[in-house]
Amino acid sequence: MALRLSTAALALAFAFTAAGCATSHQPAARSVDINLVALNDFHGNLEPSKYSYAPAGSAQKQTIQAGGIDVLGGAMAAFRKEDKDLLFVAAGDLVGASPALSSMWADEPSIEAMNRMGLVASSLGNHEFDQGSKELLRQQHGGCDSPRPSKACQLAPGFKGAGFSYLATNVVEQATGKNLVPGWRIVDVKGVKVGLIGAVLKDTPSVAVASAIKGLSFLDEADSINKVLPAMRAQGAQVFVVLIHEGGHTGEPFDKTYCDGLEGPIVGIVKKLDPAIRLVITGHSHKGYLCKVDGRVVTQADYAGHVLSRIRMQVDPASGAVRDIDVRNVVMAPGAYAPDPALAAYLQGVRARSTAELAKPVATIGATAPVQRKESEAGESPLGDLIADAALAATREQGVQVAFMNPGGIRKDLEVGDKGVVSFGQAQAVLPFGNTLVVMDLSGANLRATLEQQWDRPGGGHYMLQVSHSLSYAWDSTRPVGQRLVPGSLKVNGVPVDDAKTYRVAANNFLADGGDNFPALAKGVNRSDTQMRDLDALIAYMKQHPEFGAASMAAPQARIQKVR
């Protein structure tokens, strides 16, 4: 049945209470309200973090500290008072790229927090694969046999794993042809069998470390979702909800219902889905939106727990027909919901165990303000310069001449304390992945090709690698893709690059495997994984170079120049 999204329906749906979407609304005869709350891209943010948004009715943005598991737990408690049967679901990246408070304990606190909030199911996200499928399955099922023995089961013994289901219908083990995790789950809500289907972006290999996904295939999202519907119907599923870690973007407000300007990979996926699927909950792009695509509702709730999506589906329990869907994106602002006491106590306990380790000073530098990851118009950032130089210094003895850093791996600005003191927690927040440095030989031609691939992106635009001080070049936006480098400008240690010459290059293991769509780097030969973490290299470099101060770090060092 086609989805009815009239202005009158929206007014009726949201007039009943300023707080939510549940009890006061009186649905039409023979209909049942299925309430869902959705989260995506939590990334282990146990504590609140900075969030900028324009409140409803205002064009002026404000910045607050939003989220935190105690506030999220309080919101869930309030929502459940309206409807005890609501479904709490997620669209992936619950863990990975996490702040130290979670990552230093192998993200077990984040899994436990989701358990305590009653999460029912989540799609896998690409970051669930950061530590490989073995660790992913340990996080699902529990236990202490981990590739991170110094972190796993250290916060508390006997980690029991996720009480919720990780779902991904399009991730298959090549050796067996079986799904790595279940593709779907059916939940009975008020007598209606709701089918939850999970999927992760098929392009996960381009954003994951190759060794972490070895032996896995990532199939087409829409085809995989459509394929499981007959089996789900055979098990009694009446209503279908997709949880998918892929997303889009729109210039419309995060809380506008319903936007019609959604763009990005998710649009093509949604258009291919079976007509029975009326609701698609998305992630990955870290954007809040409430949109329509071909009459279907497509939502996302920002990231880091800043926002929760509230969704009410009005369903005919006999036929399973979806009569209406109402959606809201609700900001998890401080004071909006009373913090959950049990989760507040749990967070305090994690903080207490973590504080001493995180507060340990690791270096003192001259900076008195945060070292920024924001890039110049040319594509260079002060923090990117620092990290690339650290990688170069750490691998000099292995003959390395050039080092690269991918900007997506730099997760935070580098904060500094009094008198330029940098703590372990501040450094770890910048590079939370635990990636290791890989050295390799690249021909001059492949070095040039690597840089040209900064503009040869699947979605257009550009993605600028951060480079060590030993490399410099200029680029021209008016030149064709594949020829953006200004002829003669690419130099290593001041000498023009010779396409036939061999250069020793360092990059983190993710980038070295061709991650972030840099296949030219994967062609490197004579490869060696140093087993040195990029974080350790950064800390060592800051110790060795305390002279780095505000003046030298306040702006990029013009290694990359844009001529027009």
Image (cartoon, helix red, strand yellow):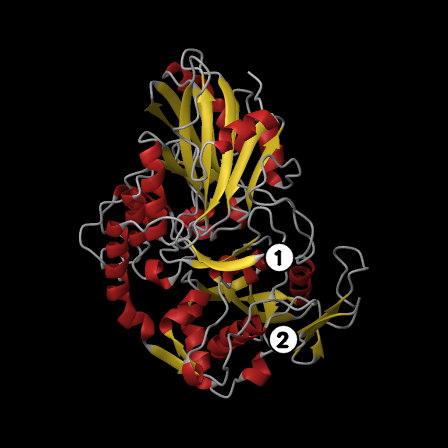
Residue 400's x, y, as percent?
A: 54, 74
Picture quadrant of residue 442: bottom right
Left or right of 47 on screen, residue 313? right
- In the image, residue 54 sits, relative to residue 199, either above or below, namely below
Q: Residues within 10 Å of mark 1 (few under 14, many from 20)?
A: many
Q: Secondary structure at mark 2?
A: loop
Q: What whole-number distance in Å separates the C-alpha atoms at marks 2 and 1?
A: 25 Å
- For image coordinates 48% across by 75% down, the residue present is 395
Using the rendered image of the protein, determine whether residue 529 is visible from the camera's viewpoint.
no
- Foreground of the two, 446 or 340: 340
Q: Find out whether the residues at labels 2 and 1 contact each other: C-beta distance under 8 Å.
A: no
Residue 556 has which mark?
2
Residue placed furthest toward the left: 157
User: Which amino acid lies under the numbered mark 1 shown in the image of this protein?
Assistant: Ala
Q: Which mark is residue 520?
A: 1
Give the label, 2 or 1, closer to the camera. Answer: 2
| Relative image position of residue 353 (x, y in whole percent) | 24, 65
Tell me if residue 110 can be seen: yes
- What is the number of the mark on residue 350? none
Residue 248: % across, % down: 59, 42
